[in-house]
Image (cartoon, helix red, strand yellow):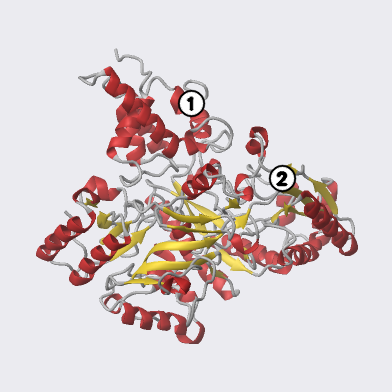
Amino acid sequence: MKLVGGWWMVGSEWSLASVVAAVWVALLYIAGVPAYAGATSARQSDATVQKGNEAYQYWCATCHGRGPGHPGTVALTAKYKGALPGLLEERTDLTPQTVRFAVRRGTSIMPFFRKTEVSDADLDAIAQYLTRRASPRR
Amino acid sequence: MAVPPGVGTRDWETALRQFRRAAGESWVFTSDDDIALYRDAYSPLWGEPEERLVSAAIAPDTTEQVSAVVRTANQFRIPVFPISTGKNLGYGGSAPNLSGSVVIDLKRMNRVVEVDDKRHFAIVEPGVAYFDLYRHIQERGLNVWIDCPDPGWGSPVGNSLDHGVGYTFGAYRDHFHSHCGLEAVLPNGDIVRTGMGALPGAKTWAEYRYGFGPTVDGLFAQGNLGIVTKMGFHLLPAPQAYQTSVVTVPRRRDIVPLVDLVNELEHQALVGMPEYFSPLGGFGRPGPPPQELVALMQRPGGPTDEEFDQYARERNAGSWSCRLQFYGSPKVIAAHLEHAKDRFAAVVAGSAFQDGELLRFPLNAEQLDRVHKVAVGIPNMSIFSIGARTELNPSPSDGHLWFSPIIPKSGEAVLEAQRVFMDAFAKLGMPSMVSPFTMPATWMHRAFIFIMAFPISRSNVAQNQRTRTVFRELVKVAAEHGWGEYRTAPVFQDDVMAAYSFNNHSLLRLHEAIKDAVDPNGIVAAGRSGIWPRHLRRTRA
């Protein structure tokens, strides 16, 4: 909290995240495909999940990693207040769609990522990685 | 499909074919979804007709591909706008000045060309992020530090070309100043190397800046004469140890000798970046100000220095503090710290030091967790914790906009800037972002940045419009006091350049003359820093 921001700046005038938050919450409940659905073989999935893990560590973990100094984890912890884990890698409710939406649309101060950064293939792999323990949809 | 301004459909289709041939079929983006990713995520014009959008994006992989793309753009007079990693958030992101420009996205050019830890330099391409360069150095066990800005995902090339700044030692944290030699593609596709790089087979491209003849590197920073495809940087040899010490002075007027003494220490290269704050308020103090202070501030004329001193005494607090950073061997640090204490004891009555722990490198995991990472050259993203949702900030904004006037490095200037901007906010009828305890950022080696952040919304157009009005007014207020912004988002670049108006805008007129000579078709980054090509130039008032 050293060098940025205003002093005693009243937040209410600027609060506007409700729309973003509403979209985000809605997406959590959109019916999605289970992470391992389809014809993909287990071996292919393992390789994709591993690739997704690597891409996640490179592109996402700098904000969404474990421990202090990770603003994405801090933000999600504040948002869900214990109802869901702040660490994305511990979530079991994510769908590939929510992952893709967050990366390509951004949310709150997290900007969207271009395809020269996170390619479609890497994004699919990240989505597989983050949904590797997804609960089956009912 | 979007078509760049002034370009016919048939020419556009021909150009796209040539772009694809140059950069590869899959590296030319034209779909609405793909080009939307080049919007400025923190745009103060989000969703308004004036928002700066792109018509396409091309991602070449080599300097030769950049050259081929630029030749085509020049042939069809297609405006292009280069980005490195596109993370210039708060100052424009990845969006161009001129809507409809084609972004040349250099992210794929992500090679670390060379790092030398005996002569202490690096040469990198624009797509290399601070994270990448740091990792390259760590994986090879090289004995050099990088100086990084707060967010580590940015590019040393892109950051330095927008005069970005960091946190460690002296001139290293002025990233353009620490650059040495560059390679650029000119608007006609020609490839040029500056400094020693102009000499084929040069051995000192990233070590001796000037080569021979006039230096032109500065024209490529915040400029629009070409697309930089490589840059050299001087690096700091890794220090053995690091220690901070916070010096606190008791009285409000002590800010003057405080800054003078820290300047002396810093300009003698005895300390790294100083970090000023007031124990009475400022950054990291959420919530409303104390009632006693509000009462004091609302009095006609405001509080006197004595009343501020009384306010501090009642809280058993000093008036101002500065965190000094010492680098080097433990012996050197101890000597520099002792000298700093001697100087303060001789000059400022009642000054007191609180020493931090001496940290020896490499740091262990526990030390890494608590150290201010950028101060020891470790890129990270923790700065976004400030804007992101937290318990204290349950409704974060969608982004922010920096207002960054440069003021002199003196206590008097800080007090004046506080007064001037508090008055300006009062006249504008909005909550002040400045308090009587606000201290400037110290990233620049020889000047202060009296920085402020405005929240940006992706849904509240009225708020963004209001912010733009306030921002423009603050640019004028600053200029009236001899302060100018060092960097700003495209939407304000004309306003800021207009303030640099000595002798009927002679500097801008020079930029325009050079622009017309080097880029007669005006294709590269039209409007960057308020420098427009002839066919888009507006009549200045």
- B434 or A76, which is in the foreground? A76
Q: Nearer the viewer, mark 2 or mark 1?
A: 1
Q: Which mark is residue B13?
A: none
Please say whether residue B45 is visible from this viewpoint: yes
At horizontal 57% and vertical 31% (from top left) the residue drawn is: A67
Q: For this view, does B31 lie left or right of residue A98?
A: left
Which amino acid type corresponds to the residue marked 1 in the rendered image? Tyr
**Looking at the picture, how far across and down is residue B6, in whole percent?**
19, 69
Q: Residue furthest top?
A: A138
Please say whether residue B99 is visible from this viewpoint: no
At horizontal 88% and vertical 59% (from top left) the residue drawn is: B342
Q: For this view, does B354 lie left or right of residue B488?
A: right
Are the residues tagged 2 and 1 within 8 Å (C-beta)? no
Q: Are marks 2 and 1 on the same chain?
A: no
Classify A55 as above or below B436. above
**Looking at the picture, how far across and down is residue B28, in whole percent?**
22, 52
Chain of the residue under the numbered disc 1 shown in the image: A
Chain of the residue under the numbered disc 2 shown in the image: B
Which quadrant does the C terminus of chain B fall into? bottom left
- B363 or B148, which is in the foreground? B363
Residue position marked by numbered label 1 in the rendering: A80
CA gap, disc 2 and disc 1: 31 Å
Q: For this view, does B540 lie left or right of residue B358?
A: left
Q: Residue furthest left?
A: B10
**Looking at the picture, how far across and down is residue B334, in whole percent?**
82, 52
In which quadrant of the rendered view does residue B12 lie?
bottom left
Classify B360 as above or below B71. above
Residue position marked by numbered label 2 in the rendering: B290
| Element on which disc 2 rests | loop
**Looking at the picture, how far across and down is residue B29, in whole percent?**
23, 51
Which amino acid type corresponds to the residue marked 2 in the rendered image? Pro
